[in-house]
Image: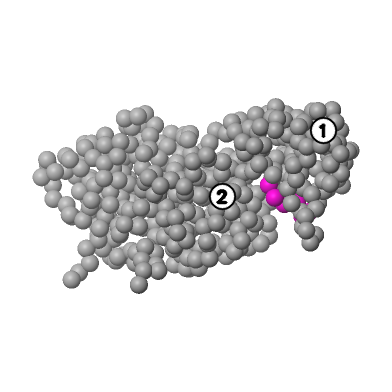
């Protein structure tokens, strides 16, 4: 069954109150759509242009108020959904993920176990461009890395698009908006930019599902997602767990093993 | 005038602070470049505090607490250790000089060790010179 037929059916039977998906935007783009009537289900599209991680909407109060929603989900959206469940931000019964296959057929994944099983079959791979950039950064000296990030971050205008696009950035009170004490300078300034992106990467360490939406959302094209990816890879390498693989996952940085291995503490 | 580094030390109340106290009562001399900030536990030492220390002009940082298994709150240092493991990697990835941040365990009985640690760190940072990279950030845009 394709997405439109499935959505129409779900809305007609009242199984869900809304379907979150994509519709055609202007000039050949797509934009997120919240379909609440069966008659409007025909506007839904799902193709390779639909890269935005729709899980970011699931923690929003106005979406929660709608009731049970279905979401047209790519693998990254499903990973984010599992992580949100692990963090107890979304309940299993609140969301009905609809996994859309390449040929357009839709699979309902009504419980977290189904999502886990579905994701286990999908390989998670970094994009070639990201892999290359990470390898390039890896080969640099520390001074070169500093210069690289300073140059990149100098374009940051602190629009917080990366934060807003991220499904894991859902705190009602964000450190960035905190005035007393003011942890990070508000203005777009070299120091504040560095600190902002450092704080964001650290707050995502062990929680990032590596969808890369923060980098895609950046209006000036800073590869901010690499910072979160780096922390995530370091958590995976050192503690052996990956966010977005299970709905019952302890946050890597709020748990520990007495025999965690490090080499730098004197 | 020769360069004298400013070292900020974030220490835990129960071990390293008491250890540093013991250094004093044992009349052990050590380099005077360190400013000690006492926090309840290494678990409270947020990475943002370290960023703030650099932003306010520190050339080097010491973060120190109880040895594993000795935490007053049972597991604060274990949690802190995990955070440092990730944070240190991120600092390096962003090009921050990790030689300027020293993580260590100093117990309340290790007065001599505290003196040794401070001396070592002061010497290292003195050789590295002022942390110009970070100081330039704070002054960026200020004529």
Q: Quadrant of residue A39?
A: top right
Left or right, residue A6 beside residue A83: right
Which residue carries the number 2 mark? A163
Mark sitting earlier along the chain (1/2): 1
Using the image, determine if residue A166 lies above or below residue B73.
below
Frontmost residue, A71 versus B95: A71
Q: How many residues crowd around disc 2 within 10 Å: few (fewer than 14), some, or many (20 or more)?
A: many
Q: Quadrant of residue B122?
A: bottom left
Q: What residue is shown at x 12% (from left), y 40% (from top)? A: B25
Quarter of the figure with the N terminus of chain A:
top right
Q: What residue is shown at x 26% (from left), y 45% (from top)? A: B37
Marking on residue A134: none
Instruction: Provide residue A71's location: percent of width, then percent of height.
Output: 74, 39
Instruction: Provide residue B61's location: percent of width, then percent of height.
Output: 31, 53
Q: CA distance from mark 1 to mark 2?
A: 31 Å
Instruction: Provide residue A20's location: percent of width, then percent of height.
Output: 74, 41
């Amino acid at each position: 069954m394709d997405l439109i037929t499935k959505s129409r059916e779900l809305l007609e039977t009242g199984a869900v109150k809304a379907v979150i998906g994509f519709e055609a935007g202007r000039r050949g783009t797509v934009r997120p759509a919240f379909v609440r009537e069966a008659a409007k289900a025909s506007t839904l599209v799902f193709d390779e242009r639909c890269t935005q991680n729709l899980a970011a909407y699931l923690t929003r109060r106005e979406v929660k108020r709608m009731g049970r929603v279905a979401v047209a989900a790519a693998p990254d959206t499903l990973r984010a959904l599992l992580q949100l469940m692990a963090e107890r931000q979304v309940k299993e019964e609140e969301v009905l993920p609809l996994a859309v296959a390449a040929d357009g057929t839709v699979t309902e994944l009504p419980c977290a176990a189904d999502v886990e099983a579905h994701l286990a079959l999908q390989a998670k791979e970094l994009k070639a461009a990201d892999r290359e950039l990470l390898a390039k950064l890896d080969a640099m000296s520390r001074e070169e890395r500093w210069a690289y990030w300073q140059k990149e971050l100098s374009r940051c205008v602190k629009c917080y698009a990366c934060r807003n696009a991220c499904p894991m950035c859902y705190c009602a009170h964000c450190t960035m908006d905190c005035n007393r004490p003011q942890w990070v300078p508000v203005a777009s300034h070299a120091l504040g930019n560095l600190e902002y992106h450092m704080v964001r990467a650290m707050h995502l360490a062990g929680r990032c599902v590596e969808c890369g939406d923060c980098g895609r959302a950046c209006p000036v094209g800073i590869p901010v997602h690499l910072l979160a990816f780096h922390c995530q890879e370091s958590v995976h390498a050192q503690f052996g767990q990956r966010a977005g693989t299970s709905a019952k996952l302890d946050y890597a940085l709020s748990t520990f093993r007495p025999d965690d291995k490090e080499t730098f503490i004197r | 005038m020769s360069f004298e580094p400013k070292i900020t030390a974030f220490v835990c109340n129960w071990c390293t602070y008491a250890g540093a106290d013991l250094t004093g009562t044992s009349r052990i001399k050590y380099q005077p470049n360190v400013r000690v900030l006492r926090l309840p536990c290494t678990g409270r030492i947020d990475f943002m505090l370290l960023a703030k220390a650099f932003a306010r002009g520190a050339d080097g940082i010491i973060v120190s607490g109880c040895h594993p298994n000795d935490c007053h709150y049972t597991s604060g240092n274990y949690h802190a250790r995990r955070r440092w493991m990730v944070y240190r990697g991120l600092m390096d990835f962003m090009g921050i000089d990790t030689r300027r941040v020293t993580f260590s365990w100093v117990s309340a009985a290790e007065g001599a060790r505290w003196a040794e640690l401070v001396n070592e760190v002061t010497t290292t940072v003195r050789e590295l010179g002022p942390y110009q990279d970070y100081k330039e950030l704070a002054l960026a845009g200020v004529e």
